[in-house]
Image (cartoon, helix red, strand yellow):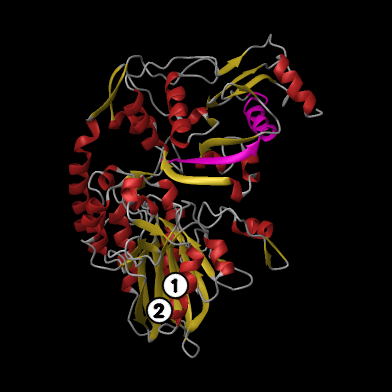
C-alpha cells in the first residue's frame, strides 16, 4: 500500500505542478553510488526479508518518467551526480568505473563532480572511465602541482540554459581526498581549500548565470538544524582552526554567498527536505548512497527575477528521496540488460581466493566473542589506526569455513554497506558506551584494541571491573580515537547516546567495512584468530586496582 501511495503521490504531484503558473525545474540527483547500479536487497529496511531494489534499471524508469513531464517551455530538468560513482560494488570496482560510466551515458547525465573515491585507483586507470563521459566532469579545486592550473580532466563549471534562465553549475571536491587516498593515486595533484576556490569562481560564474548550483562532493551534517545551532550564535560563526578535513555543505552555505542550491554527498546520509541556511537562504540537498534512491526536488522559478521562488518534494512522505523498489519502478529492459551483462563480467572474480582460514570463523560464541567478529573488529581497528573499535553482534551475518576465503565469502558475512567511522571522546564517555551494551539483558559488543571484563552482579553502568586500551589502563580523562560503523553512529542497536557526539568530533573515511575486511584478510592470511581476553564476563570479579584508582579519580 505504501508503495502504491508513493507512486500515486508522484503522479498527483506531477499533475499539480504542471498546472502551476511558475516555471518548474526538476533537479534529479545521485551521490555516492559506489557502483550500486546493479539489483540489490534493501537490507537497510529489513535485514531478514529485504525488499528488492532495481538499481540503475529502476532509476532509469523514474528518470524517464520525470523527463516525460518536460516540455522545454514551462518545465525542464537536470540530472546530476555528486561523486564517488564507482568504487564499492563489484560492477564498479572491477570495471574501474567503466560499467558505471556506460550507464551514466545511457540515461543521460548532465554533469558529474569528482569524489574522493575516484582516486582509489591510479590516475591512468581513472582517465579511461572519465574519458568515456558524454557530459562534463566538474571540479573547481583540483590543481596540477606543476602548472598551478586545474587538472585537464575537469571543468570548473558549466553554463546551461533552461526555460530562458541561465544556470551555472560549479563542481567541488572535498579536500578530505588528500587524507583518504594513496599517495601514488594523487601524485602531482593539489586540492585547494573549498571556500578559497569558491570565492574565486563564484564571481566569474555569476557574471554569466542567473542561478548558481554547487555540485559538491562534501557532506551535510547528520542533523543540520542541531549542528547549525551548535555552530552559530547571533549569526557569528564558531569556526575551527583545524582544517585537516574539508569544509562541509553547511559551512559553505553559511560562509560563501551567492550560491542558490548546494547538492552534497560524501556522508551517505540523505535528508527528506532541503535545508536552508537561515542567513544566506542557500538551499541544500543530499541523498543516500549505493544507488538505493533517486533524489528529485522541483524548483519553482520566478520568470521576472530569474530566481528560485519555491520548491516541492516529489512525495509528501518520502520527501526528495525515492527508494527504487523494483516492483514499483519496473526496470527499463535495455538498461537492465546492459547492467546485468557488465555485472556478470565483474562478478566473475567473486570466487577468487583472497586468503586462507586455518580455523572455522564462526559467529557464535561465549558472550560477545566469536572468531568472525574478532576478525572484523581487528580489520576495522587496523584500517583507521584507532585506539578502540566496537560493533554490534548483529552486524555479523555469516560465517567462513576453514579453508580458502573468497570475496563472495566476505560479502556473505558483511552484506551491509556500513562505513567505518571514527570519533573522539574521553574515557568516561567510552565507558558509558560499553556499559550501555551490557545494561540489563544486553549481551555486549564486539571489540578490538582493548580488554573489558564485567560482571552482571553489579548495578547497571557500574559493571565494568577491568578496562584496558592499547595495553594501558583506561583513563576517564584521556581522549581516545574510537572506531565503529555509521549504522551505530546513527543511534541504532541501543546506542542512542552516540547521537550526542558532536559532528566536529566525527570522521567518516568513506571506507566500506567489507572492503576493510578484504584488505585485512590479504594482509594477515592465513587466518588463525582465536577467542582471547578482549571481552570477558566474570560474575565473580571485583574491581582491578587500576580500575578502582581510575574510578576514584572520577569522583564517582
Q: Left or right: where does residue 274 sit relative to residue 103?
A: right
Residue 463: x and y, percent? 70, 21
Q: Quadrant of residue 13?
A: bottom left
Note whether 333 is above or below 487 in the view shown: below
Q: Foreground: 383 or 333?
A: 383
Residue that sits furthest to the front in the current view: 146
User: Which residue is found at the position 55% from the left and 26% from the top?
Assistant: 445
User: Which residue is found at the position 44% from the left and 37% from the top?
Assistant: 47
Q: Is residue 1 visible?
A: no
6 in magenta: no
User: Circle 2 sits on which residue?
Assistant: 167
Q: Left or right: where does residue 399 sit relative to residue 380?
A: left
Note whether 343 is above or below 442 in the view shown: below
Q: Which mark is residue 213?
A: 1
Q: Left or right: where does residue 129 sit relative to residue 30?
A: left
SS at mark 2? Answer: strand
Residue that sits furthest to the top in the current view: 540
Q: Foreground: 154 or 96?
A: 154
User: Which residue is found at the position 56% from the left and 62% from the top?
Assistant: 250
Q: CA distance from mark 2 to mark 1?
A: 7 Å
Check disc 2: other Cα within 10 Å, few if <14, some if 14-19, many if 20+.
Answer: many
Tell which circle, 2 or 1, labels the residue nearer the N-terminal end: 2
Check disc 1: other Cα within 10 Å, few if <14, some if 14-19, many if 20+.
Answer: many
Q: Answer yes or no: do the residues labelled 2 and 1 have beta carbons within 8 Å?
A: yes
Residue 287: x and y, percent? 45, 57
Residue 199: x and y, percent? 49, 72
Q: Quadrant of residue 167?
A: bottom left
Residue 532: x and y, percent? 50, 14
**Quadrant of image for the C terminus:** top right
Q: Which mark is residue 519?
A: none
Residues shaded magenta: 417-441
Q: Foreground: 472 or 50?
A: 472
Amino acid at each position: 500500500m505504501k508503495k502504491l501511495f508513493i507512486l500515486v503521490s508522484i503522479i498527483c504531484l506531477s499533475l499539480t505542478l504542471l498546472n502551476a503558473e511558475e516555471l518548474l525545474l526538476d533537479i534529479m540527483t545521485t551521490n555516492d553510488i559506489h557502483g550500486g547500479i546493479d539489483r540489490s536487497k534493501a537490507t537497510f529496511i529489513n535485514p531478514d526479508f529485504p525488499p528488492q531494489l532495481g538499481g540503475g534499471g529502476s532509476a532509469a524508469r523514474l528518470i524517464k518518467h520525470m523527463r516525460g513531464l518536460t516540455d522545454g517551455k514551462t518545465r525542464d530538468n537536470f540530472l546530476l551526480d555528486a561523486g564517488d560513482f564507482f568504487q564499492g560494488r563489484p560492477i564498479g570496482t572491477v570495471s574501474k568505473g567503466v560499467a558505471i560510466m556506460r550507464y551514466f551515458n545511457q540515461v543521460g547525465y548532465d554533469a558529474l563532480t569528482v569524489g574522493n573515491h575516484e582516486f582509489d585507483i591510479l590516475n591512468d586507470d581513472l582517465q579511461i572511465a572519465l574519458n568515456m563521459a558524454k557530459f562534463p566532469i566538474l571540479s573547481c579545486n583540483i590543481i596540477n602541482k606543476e602548472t598551478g592550473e586545474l587538472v585537464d580532466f575537469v571543468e570548473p563549471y558549466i553554463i546551461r540554459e533552461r526555460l530562458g534562465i541561465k544556470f551555472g553549475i560549479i563542481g567541488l571536491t572535498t579536500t578530505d581526498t588528500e587524507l583518504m587516498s594513496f599517495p601514488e593515486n594523487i601524485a602531482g595533484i593539489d586540492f585547494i581549500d573549498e571556500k578559497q576556490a569558491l570565492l574565486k569562481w563564484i564571481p566569474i560564474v555569476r557574471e554569466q548565470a542567473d542561478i548558481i548550483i554547487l555540485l559538491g562532493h562534501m557532506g551535510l551534517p547528520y542533523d543540520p538544524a542541531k549542528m547549525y545551532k551548535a555552530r552559530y550564535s547571533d549569526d557569528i560563526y564558531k569556526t575551527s582552526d583545524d582544517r585537516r578535513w574539508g569544509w562541509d555543505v553547511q559551512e559553505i552555505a553559511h560562509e560563501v554567498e551567492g550560491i542558490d542550491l548546494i547538492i552534497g554527498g560524501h556522508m551517505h546520509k540523505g535528508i527528506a527536505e532541503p535545508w536552508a541556511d537561515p542567513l544566506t537562504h542557500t538551499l541544500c540537498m543530499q541523498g543516500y548512497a549505493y544507488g538505493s534512491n533517486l533524489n528529485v526536488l522541483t524548483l519553482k522559478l520566478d520568470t521576472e527575477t530569474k530566481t528560485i521562488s519555491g520548491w516541492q518534494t516529489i512525495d509528501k512522505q518520502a520527501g526528495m528521496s525515492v527508494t527504487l523498489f523494483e516492483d514499483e519502478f519496473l526496470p527499463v529492459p535495455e538498461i537492465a540488460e546492459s547492467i546485468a551483462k557488465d555485472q556478470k563480467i565483474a562478478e566473475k572474480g567473486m570466487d577468487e581466493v583472497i586468503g586462507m582460514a586455518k580455523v572455522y570463523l564462526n559467529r557464535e560464541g561465549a558472550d560477545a566473542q566469536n572468531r568472525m567478529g574478532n576478525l572484523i573488529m581487528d580489520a576495522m581497528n587496523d584500517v583507521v589506526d584507532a585506539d578502540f573499535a566496537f560493533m554490534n553482534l548483529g552486524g555479523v551475518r555469516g560465517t567462513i569455513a576453514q579453508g580458502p576465503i573468497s570475496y563472495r565469502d566476505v560479502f556473505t558475512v558483511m552484506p551491509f554497506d556500513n562505513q567505518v567511522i571514527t570519533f573522539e571522546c574521553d574515557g568516561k564517555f567510552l565507558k558509558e558506551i560499553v556499559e550501555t551494551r551490557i545494561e540489563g539483558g544486553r549481551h555486549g559488543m564486539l571489540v578490538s584494541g582493548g580488554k573489558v571484563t564485567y560482571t552482571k552482579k553489579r548495578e547497571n553502568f557500574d559493571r565494568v571491573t577491568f578496562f584496558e586500551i592499547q595495553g594501558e589502563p583506561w583513563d576517564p580523562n584521556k581522549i581516545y580515537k574510537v572506531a565503529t560503523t555509521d549504522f551505530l553512529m546513527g543511534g541504532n542497536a541501543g546506542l542512542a547516546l552516540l547521537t550526542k557526539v558532536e559532528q566536529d568530533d566525527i570522521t567518516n573515511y568513506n571506507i566500506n567495512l567489507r572492503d576493510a575486511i578484504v584488505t585485512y584478510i590479504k594482509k594477515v592470511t592465513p587466518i588463525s584468530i582465536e577467542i582471547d581476553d578482549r571481552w570477558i564476563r566474570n560474575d565473580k570479579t571485583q574491581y582491578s586496582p587500576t580500575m578502582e584508582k581510575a574510578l576514584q579519580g572520577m569522583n564517582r
